[in-house]
């Protein structure tokens, strides 16, 4: 009797309820991962072994990695994440999740000179990486923190305001400052309700952002899904 292939597991860490994996769910499940999710607010979060899942996905949030006094779970998550990264286990970080990867690798995370909010294209350092599918595609940016590049990583993408938009370590660890997952997702309206100050600081408006989301969301999420599918296909054991 042929042996059954082991189902691969993926764990989503959600830092706030309205920042899930959105458009990235489709390619991750299509690659054969059974996804589970845990919120950092869950009582059992501190006991979860972050080295166990075949794939770890960490999403965004409004907090800063350096705000550990206000959010004690950050230090706990960072220590467990560092052990996973030291083992080269497949890990995807988006926005705050990318900043957590940088911090767990020993890099400094700190406030940027100004917030970057809106749909903007990326410039690519490596035109052969999976991020090439985002070429000439405006993607959503919603961040105010940045990071120094950790040691032994490859910078993949930049914008003028935030030169460190994406990096990878080997094939298995990918950090994305931008939101390629947010294409026509209804949770985007919750972002607009939760963080209107970000629009005020960048000269945007709720209606203006909704219009940009309608115009650029479909192409952004389509390209983002292709990017993630290619990255997953290149993971190594």
Image (cartoon, grey):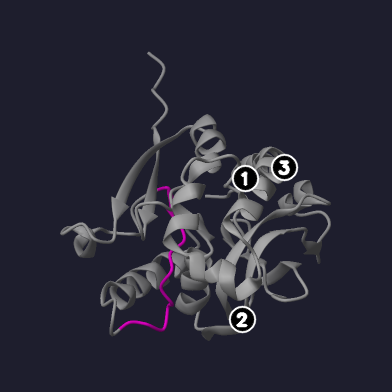
Q: Which residues are magenta?
A: 54-68
User: Image point 43% across, 49% down: which residue?
Assistant: 20
Residue 37: give its label.
Answer: none
Alpha carbon separation for disc pair 3 and 1: 22 Å
Q: Earlier in the sequence, mark 2 or mark 3?
A: 2
Dividing the picture into quadrants, the one containing residue 159 is: bottom right
Q: Earlier in the sequence, mark 2 or mark 1?
A: 2
The x and y percentages for residue 106 are 50, 83
Residue found 41% across the figure and 84% down from its top: 66
Q: Is residue 144 left or right of residue 160?
A: left
Q: Is residue 39 above or below residue 25?
A: below
Instruction: Report which residue position mark 1 lands on.
Output: 228
Q: Tag 1, which secondary structure? A: helix
Task: Please provide percent x and percent y for residue 185.
Answer: 53, 41
Residue in the image at 26% along x and 77% along y: 72
Query: Which label number is shown at residue 151?
Result: 2
Q: Which residue is mark 3?
A: 215
- Residue 154 located left or right of residue 79: right
Assign the magenta stretch its main secondary structure.
loop
Residue closest to the eye, 168 or 18: 18
Tell me where residue 150 sits by quadrant: bottom right
Q: How many marks?
A: 3
Disc 3: CA contacts within 10 A as few (<14), some (14-19) or many (>=20): some
What x and y, as percent, mark residue 141?
Answer: 63, 62
Q: Secondary structure at mark 2?
A: loop
């Amino acid at each position: 009797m042929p042996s059954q292939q082991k189902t691969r597991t993926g764990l989503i860490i959600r830092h706030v309820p309205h920042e899930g994996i959105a458009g990235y769910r489709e390619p991750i499940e299509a690659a054969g991962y059974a996804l589970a999710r845990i919120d950092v607010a869950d009582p059992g979060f501190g006991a979860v072994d972050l080295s166990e899942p075949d794939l770890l996905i960490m999403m965004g949030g409004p907090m800063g990695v350096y705000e550990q006094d206000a959010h004690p779970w950050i230090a706990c998550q960072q220590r467990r994440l560092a052990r996973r990264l030291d083992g080269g286990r497949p890990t995807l970080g988006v926005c705050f999740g990318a900043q957590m990867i940088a911090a767990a690798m020993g890099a400094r995370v700190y406030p940027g000179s100004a917030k970057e909010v809106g749909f903007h294209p990326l410039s690519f350092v490596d035109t052969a990486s999976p991020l090439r599918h985002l070429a000439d595609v405006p993607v959503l940016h919603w961040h105010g923190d940045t990071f120094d590049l950790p040691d032994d990583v490859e910078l993949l993408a930049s914008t003028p305001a935030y030169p460190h938009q994406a990096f990878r370590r080997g094939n298995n660890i990918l950090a994305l400052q931008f939101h390629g997952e947010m294409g026509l997702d209804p949770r985007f309206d919750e972002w607009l309700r939760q963080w209107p100050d970000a629009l005020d600081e960048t000269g945007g408006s709720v209606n203006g952002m909704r219009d940009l989301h309608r115009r650029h969301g479909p192409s952004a999420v389509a390209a983002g899904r292709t990017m993630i599918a290619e990255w997953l296909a290149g993971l190594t054991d």
